[in-house]
Every structure is written in C-alpha cells, then in structure tokens.
Amino acid sequence: MTQKNMVLSLYKQGSLLLLGMIALVLCTPQLGNAQVFRYPESSKQSSLMPFFVENMSAVRITEFIFEPLVTKNKRGDIEGVLAYSWTPTPDGLGITFKLRQGVKWHDGRPFTARDVVFTVKAAQDRKTLFNSKSKYRFIKSVQAIGDYQVQFRFIQPKKKPEELFNFKIIPAHAFKSTAIKRLDKFNRRPIGTGPYKVEEAALRVTKLVKFDGYWGRASIRGVEMIHTPDSSEQINLLKYSGQGSGVQAVIFIPPKNLSIFENSDTVVLEPYHTVSWWYLAFNHKNKGLSDVKVRQAIAMAMDREELLGAHLGQGDILSGPFTESSPYYNFDVEAREQDLDEAKSLLDQAGYRMKRGVRTKGRTKLTLDFVLNKDLPNSQQLALSIQAQLKQIGVDVKTTFVDAALYQEKVFNRKQFDLTMNVWSFNEIEDIFPLFRTGAPSNYISYSNKAIDAKLDESRRESDYKAHKEIMMNLHQMLNEDLPYVFLWSLDIYSGLSRQLKDIFIQPYYYYSFFKDWSLK
Amino acid sequence: MTGQSTGQSTRQSTWYSTWYSTWHSAWKEQPLSFKLSSIIVVLVLCFGVINPFISYDPVLDVELSRRDLAPSWEYWMGTDGQGRSVALRLFKGIEAFFFPGLIAGLFAAFVGGVLGALCGYFGGWIGRSLSAVLELIDTLPRMVFLVLICTIFPPSILLISIISSVLFIPSIATIIRRKVEALGAEDYILAHVAHGFHPLKIISYHILWLQCRALLTRQMIFVFSYVLFIETALSYLGDYGVQEPYPSWGNMVAQSRISAVAWPWALPALAIIITIAALLAFGDGIARREEEVKR
Amino acid sequence: MSQIGLDHPQQKSAMLNEATIRWSLWLGSKLLRGLSLLCGASFIIYATLRSAPGDMVDLILGLNGTPEMKADLRAEFGLDLNIIEGYGRWAWRALSGDLGISITFMPGEPVLSLAGPAFLVTLSIAVVSLLCSIAVAYGLAILLGPPRPRQAFLLGPIQLLNAAPSFVVAICLAKVINELIQFQLAGGGQIPPSWYPIPTYQKITDSIAPFCFAALSISLGDGLFTDLFNALRAELMSLNESLFISAVRAKGAAVRKHLIKNLIVPTLSVFTARLPLVLSAVVIVEYIFTLDGSGYLLLQAAKNRDVPVVVGVSLFFIFAVIVMNLILDLVKALVDPREVAKGD
C-alpha cells in the first residue's frame, strides 16, 4: 500500500511538472529577427563557391555573396558591377575593364585587378574541376594593368564580349594556388564582395548577414536559407510568413497549391518567366523509337493540355526547343494536338499491330522503360497520366523512379531507358547545339540526323543576327517534324512572396540579382 | 438432416469430428484478444491469397474527374487525389507486403532456426565462427542499413524483404541457440544421442520441430509484420517502397504529405495499426498456447 | 582456485592480483570483441556504399566532364582506391579519431562535426523516450499489482494502440497539430505558435516542442510501452514473490533497497535490448518533425552518395549499441562477479 501511495504522489508531482513544462513551451516568446529574410530550398546548395555551383539552390545563394564584373539590369541592358566601364577592341578580339575602386572583400581586403586575373586563371586551371569550365574557354589571356584595370584577349572575335563577363569574381588572397579543390574550407566559408556574407553554414540552415563594408547599399539585414525537401512543408512555412519562424518567399509554388494564396492578405503570387522547357526524350538506340512514325504517334497520343492543366498548372504548349518568348520561336509551326486515330494509323503504317494489348512488329514490342528522376516536380502523377494516355494506342510504358545520382547513371551514362521526361533550363538564351548535334555532350539520346547536324553547324558559323535567327526558326520546324524529343511545355512559374516585402524584382535565373533593392517591413 | 449427420459422426467417429471437437474446445478457452487477432490474421491471409487472381489496372483507374470524393456507397472508403477507389487500393495493397513478408518470414525462420540449432548443438569452432558472423550482422543498425540500401539501389520491395530477413536471422538464431543449449543438457536428448540417432535428425525433428515450432512461428510472424512496417516507413521517407501507380499501404500513407483529405492516408494507416497489432497478438497467443500444452 | 580461503595475508595479495588480472583479461577480451565488431560492421556499410550504382562524380561534372576530369575528381574524393584499400585507409585514420571529411553533402566539413551533433539529437530523443517509458511502466506495474483478468479492459486497448508504428503515430500527431494551428490561425494570423512541429531555428534550445513530440511518438508507438511494461512487471512480480525478499520482509528490514538493487540489471538489459530498435525508430520520426538528427543527415548524405558521412553516421549507431552492451556486461559482472570468474 505504501508503495502504491508513493507512486501516486510521484505521478501527481510528475504530471504537475509536465504541465509546467508544456506551459513553458507554449509561452516561450518567438525568437527571430524581424529584419531577416528567410526562404526554403528543396535541395541544399552544392557549394557556396561560384565555380562549384551545380544546382539552382547554389546559383541563388551565391548571388548574395559574390558579384560579377557586369550584369544585366532590369531592362536587360549590360550594367557594370565590379567594373564601371569597358572598351572592346575594334577587332573584337579583346576588351579592357576599368574596375570600381573602394570595393572590399568580406575580410576587409581591397578588391583589385589581381582578383579578376586570378579568377580566370583558376577557372582555366586543369586541376580545378567543375562543370561549367566551357564558360571561360573563350579567353585566351588576361592581364592586369595597374590595380584597377584588366585586359582580356579572346581566341575568336566576339560581337558583344562584355556580355560574357557575368561570371562571379573570387578573391586571390584566399587561395594558395589556382588549382582550387572542392573540399577547401573556402567553399563553406566563402569571402566575396557581395552585399551579404556568410555567418553560419549549418546542416540545414545557411545564415547570411549584411556586409557593413559593402560598396553599394542593401536594405534587409540578413538572409537565411532553410533546406526543406518537402514542398508541402514549404507551403506551410509560407503561410506563417510573419516574424520568427515561417518564410518570406517560396521560389516555386506547385500549381495545385496556388489557390491557397490566391486571395491571401499576407502573401502575393509573383509570376516570373524562366528560360526552361520540359520534354519527353526518346532513346534513339531503341529500335522502335528510331522510327519517326512511332515518335510522331507517341506525340499525337499525348494530350499535353490535359497533362499540363491537371498536374502543373499554366504554361505554354511548345512545338519546338524554344520558349515562346525566345527570338527563335517559330510561331508558324503548330503544336500537335491529341489525335488518337491519327496516332493509331501512323503506328499501322509503321507496321506495328496489336498483339496481346501491345503494338508489335516482328520481334520489336512497343514496351518502353520510362525512367524518371524523383526530384522532378509531380513526376509520379505525370508519369501515371502519360502511361494511361499511351496505353490507348497500345504502347506499354513501365515507369521507374530513381534518385538524381542513379538517374544520371542510368540515363546519361548507361543509357538504360527508352523514355524519360526532363527539363532543360538555360541561363539566358536557348543553345540547342549540344542537345541535338551528333556526338555532342548533352545529346544523351544518341540522336543523329545529317540534315539537322548541317543546320546546327551552320548556326554556329553564322554571326549575322538575322541570318542566325532564320536558321534557328528553320531548325525549330525540322525538329518538330523529326521529333528527337516530344517538346512539352514551358511553365508559368509563380513565387509566393510575403506582402511584407517591398520593391520586389525577380531575376528569372539567378533570382536574387536585385535583392539589394528589396526591403522588409 | 441434422439428426442423421450427428448419428453418422457418433457411429463412425471420423477424424474430422474429433479434430473439430478438440479445436472447438480449444477455441473456446482462448482469450478474446487471441480470437479477434486470429480472425484478422485469417482475413489478411485470405485477401493475400486471392489477391493475385483479381486483376487491377492502376493506370486505367486514374480518373481525374472524381478525385477526393468522400466515402459513399459507391466508393465506400472514398477516392484519392487521382480519383482511384481507396477501398480497392487498400485491398490490392495487401499484395505488396503479403508475399514479400511471407518469403522474408519463412526464409528468416528457416535459416535462423537451422543456424541457431547448429551453433547450439555443435559448439566448437564451427559454432563459434558462425555466431561471430551472426553477431556482426546483428550489430548493423537495421533501419540505417535498410535506408542506405534503399537510397542507393533501385527501389524494390523484394530487395527490402530479403535484406530485412537477413537482418533478422541473428536474433532468431540466438533464441534458438539458447533453447538448444538448454535442451542439450536434458536427459531425453542425451538419451536420443546415446541411442545413436543421427545428429541431423535430432536437430531437425526432436529439437527444431518438436520444441521450437511455436518460437519459430512467432518469429516468422514478427518478421512478416516488420516487412509491413519497413515498407511503410521507407515509402514515407522517400518513395523507396512499392512504386506508384501500384498500390501499397506504405505509399498510401505517404500520401499524407500531399493529400487534401484524410481518408486516402488515414484508412491505410488504421489498417496498418490493426494488422500489426493482430499479427503480434496472434504470435504471442500461439507461443502461449504451446507453453500451456507442454505443461 | 577461487575457493581458497583468505587466512594468510600473502594469499590475500595473490588473490587480489589474480582478480585484477582476471578482470583486465575479461575487460580486454570484451573491448577487443567490440572493436572487431565495429570494424566489421563499418566495413559492410562502406563496401555497400562503394558498390552502389550511380556515381556522384558523374553527377557533379554532368555531361561536360571528360574522363580525365572525372578521374582527377575521384582521386580528390578518395574514391580512386578499390574498396579494401579505401576502407583500410579510412579505418587507419578513424583509429586516430579522424572520420574523414564530407565530399558532396557539405563538401569539406569534417564528418565528426557533422555526425556527432546529429547523432546526439537522435540519441537524446531515444534515451528520453526510453527512460520515460520505463518510469511510467514501473509506476503502472506497481499501481496495478499482480495481473488480474479485469485489468484486460485497461491494458487491452493500450496494447492495441501501442502496436502502431511510431512514425504512423508521428504522422498523425503532426497532422493533428497542423490542423489545430490552421484552425486557430484561420483569421489571417501569421505567427506560428512555438509548438509548431517545424522548429523555428534548428537547435533544441530554441524550440523544445518538436523534440517533445518526437519523444512522445516514440513512446506511444512500436509496442515500446507494452513490451517494457510486460517485461518489467514480470520482473517485479517474480522478485516480489521470491524467497529472499520474503526473508528480508520477515526480518523487518527495508525491502525497497533490496528491490532496487535487484532491479538494476533487468532494467538495464531491457534498456540495452530496446535501444537499437528505438534508435532506428527515431531516424524516421525525427525526419517527420524536421529535427536535425542523423535521420536527415543519413538520408541526404546517402542521396548524395557521400561515403564518409554515411559511414560516419552508421558508425555512431554501431558504436552506441556496442558500448551499451559493454556497459550491461560490466554492470552484470559487478553485481555478480561469477561471470568474470568463469572466463570467456
């Protein structure tokens, strides 16, 4: 009995303690800084060092920390950042930049021409290994003239060379040699000239604070990037966009969630246009798919309007490898509409007959492996609907969802796929040469067409803008007929931004290029 | 009619009538929890067995016009975000864990039982090295290892079930080894040895079959429920289980992240809870009954 | 040997010496065994990860990478050696406390500083929920006394609900909390309460709520409580009815001290037996409540094929289990030195 009483009294005390703790938890004041801008990212940045930027998350966050020589302003004109004036040589083979004085690195050292020279040398160093090395290949030599002037020479003549100098500059004094290693401490604790410097790079959160010695001006005191893989969690956080927890911006709001914020008092939906388009790629090594009639039939079996509307929201259905805002988009080419009868008759013409529910010709069955990257938004639902649509014409699709690393291995390296869906994103303008030229690096679908190769080569040689445009529009037409991909759509993308933010302007690719003008109430 | 049949059974006293009467009296003695759980287990078994014979095309089931419908007479567990009937998917989802679970359970119980008996019976360096290997496998953190396997290899429920059964072998083997070691000292086993029975026969029949049957059944059921558990968990962590469009209870629960309404994920969650509870209670019941019978 | 009496001082010192030797031998063999298990298990994980399809180097360099570039990067990441050599190098460094550096998840960050704090979160959730469950289970066992049929009405439903997998409990809990908040803030509020399941700042000190929710889900799920309750109650009952306690009681001495002393070993063994299971449950549950534990780290690192980080995190799990077993053995031996005397 005494034991029981003891336990009872213990329980009483314990529950009181528990209640007290709960009360404490409920009443703790919200920590958080009113002047800090927080945003979630669905993937973590690959690095904070501009060279090793391999995902969009890294592209966006480095925009706070580093600056290029020149950039495009809101109107699309070239504007100086670290350089204030430039003079191309008349032969188009060189350019001289005059650099801004009084710019400081985050550690207080002055920014000089030496840093610019170092950046180019480091990028061209054979031992510095990164993805976008080709961006620096056009430079033949670089030379500092004094502390605030840099002279470049090119391999080939360039028309508007200043446009190519939008790469970010890194400090020479932070490195021992031009061979930059990925595992260097600098990549977690970078030093830049940008308006924000890195305060803490933790597991999930990267914290940036305003750099006091910045040469320009920025309004918001700090930035925090929170890695939030789950997109519905991002939406939840945006709902609480107030002080403390919650975020002030979600970069991509899935269309099905747009309605949540349509009449919101706290969040505004901001559309922006990205230069990116979706496609359904065929593996041209597949016997069935190397037949253009089969590809056309598959394209005609798909109802792209419905797929887009049901799973991704609004966008433009495309007929070729350009977005509608691109100068090369050929509006004379019609996008194929769904036409099941036509698709079936095309398959009949190609010699594929129904056999146990699957179109078969000899020993070739139209049973296709559809490999998808799990990280692609709404990939599961889309794949399911595509599967259902293709089944109507007797094409049997088997889907496999894999993670990014395995996708790379399966699709790009081993080419173990028949169909895959993906997105190409471009910085400014669509460069389709590496996608469709025989043997080009991004032509992972093993596509080869002599006529198209010839046209692509011609486009590379042509420097006259009008003639170039003509060629590209021609290519659009040809690619639409030959269908290396089924060109799907480009999306109208919406960001959700808190109404506390003022003077927002989104750069479609780098996103935060004009962040220093933003302010937070 | 009834009179005639009872008359016959009393006259002939057929095997089934004795079986029935013993079974019936045994059933009446059981606690309620065992009765309930065995009903559920039998239901799951029946559903699992008839599952492959009922064809279901998950692709053609997609109908965007009827998504997120509340439970009604037509769809009595409602429909999900793709307009598919939750009840039908719940039923078809049994297939996803039923056969892998069965395979994993049988495999783990068989291999674990044999290895455990060998270790316990022989001792010596064979037994010692075997138990060292088993101990090594046992130190691997199960969940961590499974998550690892599922992230880096293409997802497949068969792989999950094989790995989880391998991870369970050591614990089963240890239980059996202890039992065998305890039995090894008993007189009647020694008597069998003295009679010159082949050790394999003693291990397989006298020890494993007669003494460890209930233990192994219980472990098998445990592994079965673990496969269900792990499939669900991995589906939640990142679609590592059964892949859409094919249904599994795991990927249905994982819908909780995206579903606007509760039933597409709450009902499978409930099904998981009830099934696991029933399986565990059933396993315990069997083990307890065996103990009672022995006494 | 151990039956020698303690008549002469010489004999006594000899005895002491012998005991020390025996103890250190025993401890040494246990430690050696733990170390070899650690090595073996970490090798399995290393080998699994290295033999996985899909290479991070390809992912990084993309379609532009030349074979030479890929080879160079592999060398930089330490992926150029074959599995056995690579593991050997890793293990050699690990012996001096260097678990390597992260190569792709947080490039350059030492694994120890990544995995250590993350594992601490996981471990503390596991330990807190286990200890709470044990305390409540003991309390309930004492309150209920010996098993009676009528208790089934209380224990049956507990058992049923407790059978739910912990992460299903966690999902439901998170959903309910979210609904509550949404209901509360339907009038256009923006400031989430501090008990919002997603921590504001990812440190336990900033918001303890997600941590509590995770621990609660663990205690409520996986049959943890029922198992503990059954085991501890059986222990308590058999002890209560045992002869020596009756003797103590008859003598009129304090029973409690003896009870507690004799419950230490069973409680500890229940704790150690359950710890690995609870740790694995925490991996998923903390993911649901977005705590920065090893679940998050493990998944992200495995996605990025970050070999050193994954092996490092797993090493902590293995290490915890081995250490707990060692402690259990030690306590058992201290309580009952016959174990040591038997030798191994």
Image (cartoon, coloured by chain):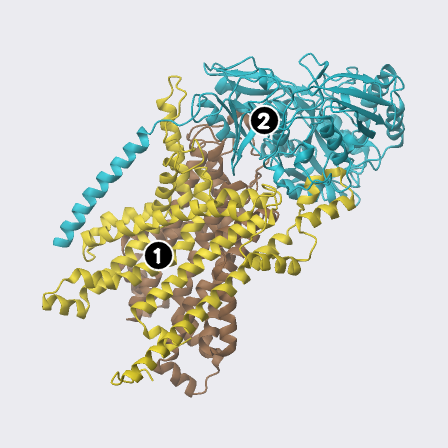
Among the chains, which one is yellow? C
Q: Nearer the viewer, mark 1 or mark 2?
A: 1
**Of the pair C138 and A436, the residue shown nearer to us:** C138
Between A249 and C220, the residue placed more toward the observer is: A249
Type of amino acid under label 2: His
Q: How many marks?
A: 2
Give the label on residue C271, or none: 1
Assign a secondary structure to mark 1. Answer: helix
Q: Hey, which quadrant is residue C196 in on the image?
A: top left
Q: Is residue C275 left or right of residue B142?
A: left
Q: Colour of chain A?
A: cyan
Q: Give residue A311's mark.
A: 2
Disc 1 packing (10 Å; few <14; some 14–19; many ≥20): many
Q: CA distance from mark 1 to mark 2?
A: 49 Å
Locate residue B162: give its quadrant: bottom right
Q: Is C33 drawn above or below residue C268 in the view shown?
A: below
Above or below, comparing residue A354 to residue C225 in the picture? above
Q: Who's the residue at 73% across and 29% down the image? A: A114
The label shown at residue C10 is: none
Q: Which chain is the one coloured brown? A: B
Dot 1 and dot 2 within a common chain: no
Residue A359 in the image, given as x and y percentages of width and height? 73, 39
